[in-house]
Amino acid sequence: MAEIVVVENKRAGGELVASTIRRLIEAKADTVLGLATGSTPLPVYAALAQSLRKDPMDVSRVRGFALDEYVGLPAGHSESYRTVITRDVVRPLGLTPANIYVPNGDTTSLEHAGSDYERALEAAGGVDLQILGIGRTGHLGFNEPGSSFASLTRVKTLAPKSRADNARFFASPDDVPMHCITQGLGTIRRARHLVLLAFGAEKAAAIHAAVEGPVTASQPGSAIQLHEHVTVVLDEPAAAELSNLDYYRYIWANKPVWQGI
Protein backbone atom coordinates (compact mmCIF):
# COMPACT_ATOMS: atom_id res chain seq x y z
CA MET A 1 0.00 0.00 0.00
CA ALA A 2 1.22 3.49 -0.81
CA GLU A 3 2.01 5.78 2.10
CA ILE A 4 -0.40 8.73 2.07
CA VAL A 5 0.77 11.99 3.62
CA VAL A 6 -1.70 14.86 3.86
CA VAL A 7 -0.02 18.24 4.34
CA GLU A 8 -1.36 21.69 5.12
CA ASN A 9 -0.44 23.14 1.73
CA LYS A 10 1.85 22.65 -1.25
CA ARG A 11 4.68 24.52 0.44
CA ALA A 12 4.67 22.05 3.33
CA GLY A 13 4.60 19.20 0.85
CA GLY A 14 7.57 20.66 -1.00
CA GLU A 15 9.56 21.01 2.22
CA LEU A 16 8.83 17.42 3.23
CA VAL A 17 9.99 15.97 -0.07
CA ALA A 18 12.97 18.33 -0.32
CA SER A 19 14.23 17.20 3.10
CA THR A 20 14.01 13.59 1.95
CA ILE A 21 15.98 14.36 -1.21
CA ARG A 22 18.62 16.18 0.80
CA ARG A 23 19.11 13.20 3.12
CA LEU A 24 19.35 10.95 0.08
CA ILE A 25 22.11 13.09 -1.45
CA GLU A 26 23.95 13.21 1.88
CA ALA A 27 24.00 9.42 1.90
CA LYS A 28 24.74 9.03 -1.82
CA ALA A 29 26.54 11.90 -3.54
CA ASP A 30 25.72 10.64 -7.04
CA THR A 31 22.02 10.17 -6.35
CA VAL A 32 19.86 9.74 -9.45
CA LEU A 33 16.66 11.81 -9.35
CA GLY A 34 13.67 11.39 -11.63
CA LEU A 35 12.54 14.90 -12.50
CA ALA A 36 8.96 15.87 -13.29
CA THR A 37 7.95 19.18 -14.85
CA GLY A 38 4.77 21.22 -14.57
CA SER A 39 3.57 23.27 -11.61
CA THR A 40 3.13 20.39 -9.13
CA PRO A 41 6.81 19.69 -8.30
CA LEU A 42 7.84 23.36 -8.18
CA PRO A 43 7.44 23.60 -4.37
CA VAL A 44 9.89 20.70 -4.03
CA TYR A 45 12.52 22.36 -6.18
CA ALA A 46 11.99 25.72 -4.47
CA ALA A 47 12.32 24.21 -0.98
CA LEU A 48 15.43 22.25 -1.94
CA ALA A 49 17.04 25.34 -3.49
CA GLN A 50 16.30 27.30 -0.32
CA SER A 51 17.78 24.54 1.82
CA LEU A 52 20.96 24.48 -0.27
CA ARG A 53 21.35 28.25 0.00
CA LYS A 54 20.91 28.13 3.76
CA ASP A 55 23.12 25.09 4.30
CA PRO A 56 25.25 24.41 1.19
CA MET A 57 26.31 20.91 0.22
CA ASP A 58 28.02 19.42 -2.80
CA VAL A 59 25.46 18.45 -5.44
CA SER A 60 27.88 18.38 -8.36
CA ARG A 61 27.58 14.61 -8.77
CA VAL A 62 23.78 14.42 -8.56
CA ARG A 63 22.23 13.09 -11.76
CA GLY A 64 18.74 13.66 -13.08
CA PHE A 65 16.46 12.12 -15.69
CA ALA A 66 13.41 13.98 -16.95
CA LEU A 67 10.18 12.07 -17.37
CA ASP A 68 9.34 13.32 -20.83
CA GLU A 69 9.79 15.80 -23.64
CA TYR A 70 7.70 17.23 -26.44
CA VAL A 71 8.43 16.07 -29.96
CA GLY A 72 9.39 18.61 -32.59
CA LEU A 73 10.01 21.77 -30.55
CA PRO A 74 13.13 23.61 -31.72
CA ALA A 75 16.22 23.59 -29.50
CA GLY A 76 15.94 26.28 -26.85
CA HIS A 77 12.15 26.61 -27.12
CA SER A 78 10.86 28.18 -23.92
CA GLU A 79 8.43 25.30 -23.28
CA SER A 80 10.69 22.40 -24.13
CA TYR A 81 11.25 20.34 -21.03
CA ARG A 82 15.00 20.65 -21.49
CA THR A 83 14.56 24.42 -21.06
CA VAL A 84 12.10 24.02 -18.19
CA ILE A 85 14.32 21.58 -16.29
CA THR A 86 17.31 23.89 -16.75
CA ARG A 87 15.32 26.90 -15.50
CA ASP A 88 13.42 25.27 -12.62
CA VAL A 89 15.89 22.66 -11.40
CA VAL A 90 19.45 22.79 -12.71
CA ARG A 91 20.18 26.46 -12.15
CA PRO A 92 18.36 26.97 -8.82
CA LEU A 93 19.93 23.86 -7.31
CA GLY A 94 23.36 24.34 -8.85
CA LEU A 95 23.39 20.93 -10.51
CA THR A 96 25.92 19.99 -13.17
CA PRO A 97 24.17 20.44 -16.54
CA ALA A 98 26.02 17.51 -18.13
CA ASN A 99 24.52 15.20 -15.48
CA ILE A 100 20.92 16.00 -16.43
CA TYR A 101 19.24 13.97 -19.16
CA VAL A 102 16.05 14.69 -21.10
CA PRO A 103 14.51 12.43 -23.77
CA ASN A 104 15.45 13.49 -27.27
CA GLY A 105 12.42 14.94 -29.03
CA ASP A 106 14.23 15.68 -32.28
CA THR A 107 12.14 14.28 -35.12
CA THR A 108 15.24 12.99 -36.91
CA SER A 109 16.10 10.50 -34.17
CA LEU A 110 12.73 9.34 -32.85
CA GLU A 111 13.09 5.74 -34.02
CA HIS A 112 15.81 5.05 -31.46
CA ALA A 113 15.31 7.89 -28.95
CA GLY A 114 13.37 5.67 -26.54
CA SER A 115 15.91 2.86 -26.50
CA ASP A 116 18.73 5.40 -26.19
CA TYR A 117 17.10 6.82 -23.07
CA GLU A 118 16.54 3.39 -21.58
CA ARG A 119 20.24 2.59 -22.03
CA ALA A 120 21.23 5.86 -20.35
CA LEU A 121 18.98 5.10 -17.38
CA GLU A 122 20.44 1.62 -17.08
CA ALA A 123 24.01 2.93 -17.29
CA ALA A 124 23.26 5.37 -14.46
CA GLY A 125 22.14 2.52 -12.23
CA GLY A 126 18.47 3.48 -12.24
CA VAL A 127 16.52 6.21 -10.49
CA ASP A 128 16.75 6.44 -6.70
CA LEU A 129 13.78 8.77 -6.21
CA GLN A 130 11.24 9.59 -8.89
CA ILE A 131 9.16 12.75 -8.49
CA LEU A 132 5.73 12.44 -10.08
CA GLY A 133 2.66 14.52 -10.67
CA ILE A 134 -0.63 13.16 -11.95
CA GLY A 135 -2.89 14.51 -14.67
CA ARG A 136 -6.66 14.82 -14.53
CA THR A 137 -6.85 11.81 -16.87
CA GLY A 138 -4.75 9.85 -14.38
CA HIS A 139 -1.66 10.01 -16.54
CA LEU A 140 1.86 9.71 -15.12
CA GLY A 141 4.42 11.43 -17.28
CA PHE A 142 2.67 11.38 -20.63
CA ASN A 143 1.36 7.84 -20.21
CA GLU A 144 -2.25 8.38 -21.17
CA PRO A 145 -5.10 5.98 -20.27
CA GLY A 146 -4.54 2.68 -22.03
CA SER A 147 -0.77 2.70 -21.55
CA SER A 148 0.74 -0.66 -20.72
CA PHE A 149 2.13 -1.12 -17.22
CA ALA A 150 5.13 -2.76 -18.90
CA SER A 151 5.75 0.14 -21.31
CA LEU A 152 9.20 1.67 -21.69
CA THR A 153 10.35 5.04 -22.99
CA ARG A 154 8.61 5.69 -26.29
CA VAL A 155 6.76 8.19 -28.49
CA LYS A 156 3.12 8.80 -27.57
CA THR A 157 0.23 10.84 -28.97
CA LEU A 158 -1.07 13.34 -26.43
CA ALA A 159 -4.73 13.10 -25.48
CA PRO A 160 -6.85 16.18 -26.28
CA LYS A 161 -7.41 16.78 -22.56
CA SER A 162 -3.67 16.78 -21.88
CA ARG A 163 -3.03 19.17 -24.76
CA ALA A 164 -5.77 21.43 -23.41
CA ASP A 165 -4.25 21.35 -19.92
CA ASN A 166 -0.86 22.36 -21.31
CA ALA A 167 -2.19 25.04 -23.66
CA ARG A 168 -1.74 27.70 -20.96
CA PHE A 169 2.02 27.46 -21.49
CA PHE A 170 1.79 28.21 -25.22
CA ALA A 171 0.67 31.22 -27.26
CA SER A 172 -2.15 29.17 -28.82
CA PRO A 173 -3.69 25.74 -28.15
CA ASP A 174 -2.66 24.82 -31.68
CA ASP A 175 0.98 25.33 -30.71
CA VAL A 176 0.91 22.45 -28.20
CA PRO A 177 2.75 19.53 -29.82
CA MET A 178 0.71 16.51 -30.80
CA HIS A 179 3.39 14.02 -29.77
CA CYS A 180 5.82 13.49 -26.95
CA ILE A 181 8.47 11.03 -25.86
CA THR A 182 7.91 9.74 -22.34
CA GLN A 183 9.25 7.23 -19.89
CA GLY A 184 6.85 4.31 -19.81
CA LEU A 185 5.01 3.03 -16.77
CA GLY A 186 7.40 0.09 -16.70
CA THR A 187 10.33 2.50 -16.72
CA ILE A 188 8.83 4.61 -13.93
CA ARG A 189 8.14 1.53 -11.81
CA ARG A 190 11.84 0.61 -11.87
CA ALA A 191 12.67 3.63 -9.71
CA ARG A 192 13.46 2.63 -6.14
CA HIS A 193 11.15 5.22 -4.54
CA LEU A 194 8.16 6.91 -6.16
CA VAL A 195 6.99 10.22 -4.71
CA LEU A 196 3.67 11.34 -6.18
CA LEU A 197 2.47 14.86 -5.41
CA ALA A 198 -0.99 16.31 -6.03
CA PHE A 199 -2.49 19.60 -4.92
CA GLY A 200 -5.97 20.96 -5.50
CA ALA A 201 -9.50 19.61 -5.80
CA GLU A 202 -9.13 19.03 -9.55
CA LYS A 203 -6.73 16.16 -8.77
CA ALA A 204 -8.96 14.44 -6.19
CA ALA A 205 -10.66 12.02 -8.58
CA ALA A 206 -7.36 10.95 -10.18
CA ILE A 207 -5.81 10.41 -6.76
CA HIS A 208 -8.75 8.32 -5.59
CA ALA A 209 -8.46 6.15 -8.71
CA ALA A 210 -4.68 5.82 -8.35
CA VAL A 211 -4.65 4.95 -4.65
CA GLU A 212 -7.94 3.12 -4.04
CA GLY A 213 -9.33 2.18 -7.43
CA PRO A 214 -8.74 -0.99 -9.41
CA VAL A 215 -5.35 -1.51 -11.01
CA THR A 216 -6.15 -0.82 -14.63
CA ALA A 217 -4.53 0.67 -17.71
CA SER A 218 -7.58 2.94 -17.92
CA GLN A 219 -6.10 4.73 -14.89
CA PRO A 220 -2.32 4.86 -15.42
CA GLY A 221 -1.81 6.30 -11.95
CA SER A 222 -3.01 3.01 -10.44
CA ALA A 223 0.35 1.53 -11.48
CA ILE A 224 1.73 2.90 -8.21
CA GLN A 225 -0.17 0.15 -6.39
CA LEU A 226 2.28 -2.35 -7.90
CA HIS A 227 5.35 -0.62 -6.44
CA GLU A 228 6.91 -1.51 -3.10
CA HIS A 229 7.90 2.01 -2.02
CA VAL A 230 5.46 4.82 -2.86
CA THR A 231 4.80 8.06 -1.02
CA VAL A 232 1.77 10.14 -2.04
CA VAL A 233 1.90 13.74 -0.77
CA LEU A 234 -1.43 15.60 -0.93
CA ASP A 235 -3.09 18.73 0.32
CA GLU A 236 -6.57 18.48 1.82
CA PRO A 237 -8.51 19.17 -1.42
CA ALA A 238 -6.57 16.54 -3.36
CA ALA A 239 -7.18 13.99 -0.59
CA ALA A 240 -10.90 14.72 -0.29
CA GLU A 241 -12.20 11.67 -2.19
CA LEU A 242 -10.08 9.05 -0.42
CA SER A 243 -12.33 6.58 1.39
CA ASN A 244 -9.72 5.51 3.93
CA LEU A 245 -8.36 8.96 4.69
CA ASP A 246 -8.72 8.63 8.46
CA TYR A 247 -6.69 5.43 8.38
CA TYR A 248 -3.95 7.04 6.30
CA ARG A 249 -3.76 9.91 8.77
CA TYR A 250 -3.50 7.43 11.65
CA ILE A 251 -0.65 5.56 9.99
CA TRP A 252 1.31 8.74 9.32
CA ALA A 253 0.72 10.12 12.83
CA ASN A 254 2.07 6.93 14.39
CA LYS A 255 4.99 6.28 12.06
CA PRO A 256 8.48 6.23 13.66
CA VAL A 257 10.21 9.51 12.82
CA TRP A 258 13.44 7.77 11.87
CA GLN A 259 11.72 6.01 8.97
CA GLY A 260 11.17 9.22 7.01
CA ILE A 261 9.04 8.79 3.90
Image (cartoon, rainbow, N blue to C red):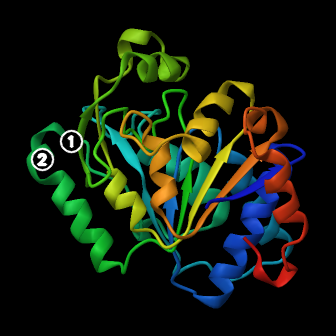
Q: Which of the pair 86/139 is nearer the observer? A: 139
Q: Look at 32% across and 40% down and name the residue there.
A: 75
Q: Look at 55% across and 43% down and name the residue there.
A: 210
Image-based side of 22 in relation to 230, left or right: right
Which secondary structure lies at badge 1? loop
Q: Residues within 10 Å of mark 1 (few under 14, many from 20)?
A: some
Q: Look at 40% across and 34% down and name the residue there.
A: 77
Q: Position of residue 73 (x, y in %)?
A: 31, 32
Q: Look at 44% across and 18% down and name the residue there.
A: 161
Image-based side of 209 in relation to 23, left or right: left
Q: Which of the pair 256/196 is nearer the observer? A: 256
Q: Which residue is mark 2?
A: 109
The amino acid marked with disc number 2 is Ser
Q: Which residue is mark 1?
A: 106
Q: Residues within 10 Å of mark 2 (few under 14, many from 20)?
A: few
Which secondary structure lies at badge 2? helix
Q: Are marks 2 and 1 in contact (CB under 8 Å)?
A: yes
Q: Position of residue 199 (x, y in %)?
A: 73, 37
User: How many angstroms separate mark 2 from mark 1 (CA)?
Assistant: 6 Å
Q: Quadrant of the C terminus?
A: bottom right
Q: Quadrant of the N terminus?
A: bottom right
The amino acid marked with disc number 1 is Asp
Residue 189 is marked as none
Image-based side of 10 in relation to 182, left or right: right
Q: Position of residue 190 (x, y in %)?
A: 39, 68
